[in-house]
Image (cartoon, helix red, strand yellow):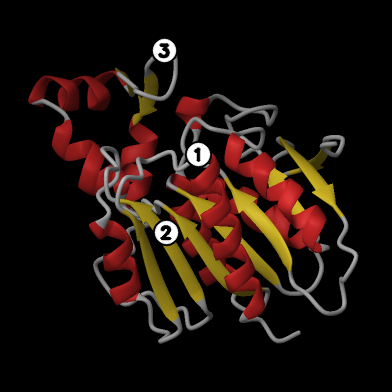
């Protein structure tokens, strides 16, 4: 059954909710850390499926809620990529030991890459699921009308319809402006650890070509991208979850502890 939630304190006193399970092979295998997507949380289908898989495989595993998500403190509209990377680094530093494989889903894939850049000695491999680096600038901003752009700059927030939640996303000006400070796909991404990616080719939220762009920008050569021809953005069907678990196993297998 799922592990009980615990809480970490960020530097400013905010609380980060997380779940942790110890591995049965801590000396021979890296741990696994899951980073959820935008407006998702640590209780999502993929996060829980990976927890069950990691328990079965004997890997230690952490899933957590980023600022403004789930049971962590803060308002979603006050969140930003920089803030979410700080959360991930805090979890990495305080809730894990030894080498870790980061698993980033959608927006969590952007946070995954930035976290690995911040802690290259701790991050041994990457596993990305429909990764969405630079989505604020490349996907979100271009879709806004002139009126919406004016509104978010003047009011500081705008409500954007969502296919994944009952209500709209409340997007903050901070998210857009901070995103521009964290863009990755304009230059080489200075990471050389093994990286594995999976992306659905019927993804209507994040183009599957994004995973190819990330693979091309990574400095390392041990990079593989897999496509699911009939897969959507969620990749949460049983067959998708099985492929994600296999992807994580592959990433773990590349790490020499």
Disc 2 from disc 3: Cα separation:
28 Å
Label 3: which residue?
167
Location of residue 64 (image quadrant): top right
Q: Earlier in the sequence, mark 2 or mark 3?
A: 3
The residue depicted at 42 percent of the width and 85 percent of the height is 220
Instruction: Classify the position of the C terminus by image quarter.
Output: bottom right
Q: Is residue 75 above or below residue 225?
A: above
Q: Position of residue 200 (x, y in %)?
A: 34, 49
Residue 132 visible? The answer is yes
Question: Are there few (<14), some (14-19), or many (20+) residues within 10 Å of tag 3?
Answer: few
The residue depicted at 68 percent of the width and 40 percent of the height is 48
Label 2: which residue?
198
Q: Is residue 134 above or below residue 173?
A: below
Tell me the element at label 2.
Answer: strand
The residue depicted at 64 percent of the width and 28 percent of the height is 70
The residue depicted at 29 percent of the width and 45 percent of the height is 206
Q: Position of residue 185 (x, y in %)?
A: 28, 65
Residue 80 is marked as none
Look at discs 2 and 3 and give the one toward the viewer: 2
Q: Nearer the viewer, residue 231 or 119?
A: 231
Q: Earlier in the sequence, mark 2 or mark 1?
A: 2
- In this rendering, would 27 be left or right of 249? right
Label 1: which residue?
236
């Amino acid at each position: 059954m799922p592990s009980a939630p615990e809480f970490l304190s960020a530097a400013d006193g905010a609380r980060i909710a997380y779940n942790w399970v110890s591995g049965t092979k801590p000396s021979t295998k890296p741990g696994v850390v899951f980073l959820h997507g935008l407006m998702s949380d640590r209780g999502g289908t993929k996060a829980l499926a990976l927890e069950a898989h990691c328990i079965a495989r004997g890997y230690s595993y952490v899933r957590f809620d980023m600022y403004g998500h789930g049971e962590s403190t803060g308002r979603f509209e006050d969140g930003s990529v920089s803030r979410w990377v700080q959360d991930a680094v805090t979890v990495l530093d305080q809730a894990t030991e030894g080498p870790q494989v980061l698993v980033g889903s959608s927006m969590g894939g952007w946070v995954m890459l930035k976290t690995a850049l911040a802690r290259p000695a701790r991050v041994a491999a990457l596993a990305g699921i429909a990764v969405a680096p630079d989505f604020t600038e490349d996907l979100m901003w271009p879709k806004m009308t002139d009126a919406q752009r004016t509104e978010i700059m003047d009011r500081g927030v705008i409500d954007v319809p969502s296919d994944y939640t009952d209500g709209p996303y409340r997007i903050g000006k901070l998210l857009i402006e901070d995103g521009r400070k964290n863009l990755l796909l304009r230059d080489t991404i200075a990471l050389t650890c093994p990286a594995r990616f999976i992306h659905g080719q019927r993804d209507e939220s994040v183009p599957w070509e994004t995973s190819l762009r990330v693979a091309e920008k990574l400095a390392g050569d041990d990079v593989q991208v897999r496509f699911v021809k009939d897969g959507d953005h969620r990749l949460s069907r049983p067959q998708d979850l099985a492929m994600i678990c296999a992807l994580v196993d592959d990433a773990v297998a590349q790490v020499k502890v």
